[in-house]
Image (spheres, rainbow, N blue to C red):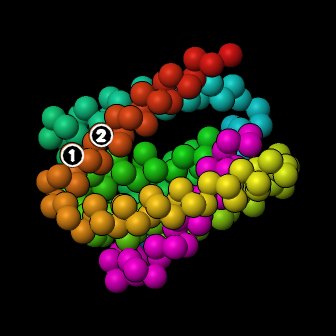
Amino acid sequence: MEAIQINLILSLIISLALITKIKKDIDFGILKRLIAGSVIGLPLGIVTFLFLDINKLKMGISIIILLLTMLLILKFRIKQNKGKDLFVGGLSGSLTASIGMPGPPVLLYFSGTDTSKEKLRGTTLAFYLFIYLMSLFIQIIFAGTSKTVWLSSGLALPLVGLGLYLGQLLFNRVNQRFFRIFTYVILLFTGIYLLIDSWKP
């Protein structure tokens, strides 16, 4: 629980720090549908967190992420529409409330629709700002929190600031093709990490 809440707090801070820089890149139509879908997904996620075996959930999610990422690498593509926006928002909301990780569904979706790196970053960060805040709120209400969560989050802030600075430098220097490859690497790493983490007792 503590690791999930620390992740939510730090991710919320990152989104807040970047939101003013990327407002012009946000697709507000897609953003509204992602948020609408997440409103349904969030309560489902907290039910999952409270009553299901999280390790089994992580294992299942990791396998899906790895399989879908391999399909994307093999040039499988998705056609973006309103229904898929809502579904991805719901799935992302559910994963945020259950394991504190909204990124994979959105990254997989936007990568599959060949979304530009600017639009991907702007829209996902704006969505994360909403989803992290709501997920943290729901987590605190239903699962509680601790002093350790907030102290650890505070101690991690210098590293977060350094990461933001380096990330901005990298983003400005990479082209669309390299950005897509980098996204695949993140997804593969996430899938492998979740798979390994799901084996913990």
Asked whether the beta carbons under mark 2 and mark 1 sit within 8 Å of each other, the answer is yes
- Amino acid identity at mark 1: Ile
**x then y, percent, for residue 176:** 16, 59
* Pointer 1 residue: 181
Residue density around tag 2, few if under 14, some if 14–19, many if 20 or more, within 10 Å: few
Q: Residue at x 57, y 61 (%)?
A: 158
Q: Which mark is residue 185?
A: 2
Q: Which mark is residue 42?
A: none
**x then y, percent, for residue 19:** 47, 76
**x then y, percent, for residue 190:** 43, 37
Relative side of 174 to 104, left or right: left
Relative side of 33 to 144, left or right: left
Count of marks, rendered view: 2
Residue 52 image-quadrant placement: top right
Where is 85 relative to 97, above or below? below
Q: Provide the residue span drawn in magenta.
A: 1-29
Q: Residue at x 62, y 41 (%)?
A: 99
Q: Nearer the viewer, residue 151 or 131?
A: 151
Where is 78 relative to 115, above or below? above
Compute the Cα span from label 2 to label 1: 6 Å
Q: Residue at x 41, y 53 (%)?
A: 106
- Amino acid identity at mark 2: Val
Q: Is residue 44 magenta?
A: no
Q: Nearer the viewer, residue 145 or 166?
A: 166
Under tag 2, what secondary structure?
helix
Where is 89 relative to 61, above or below? below
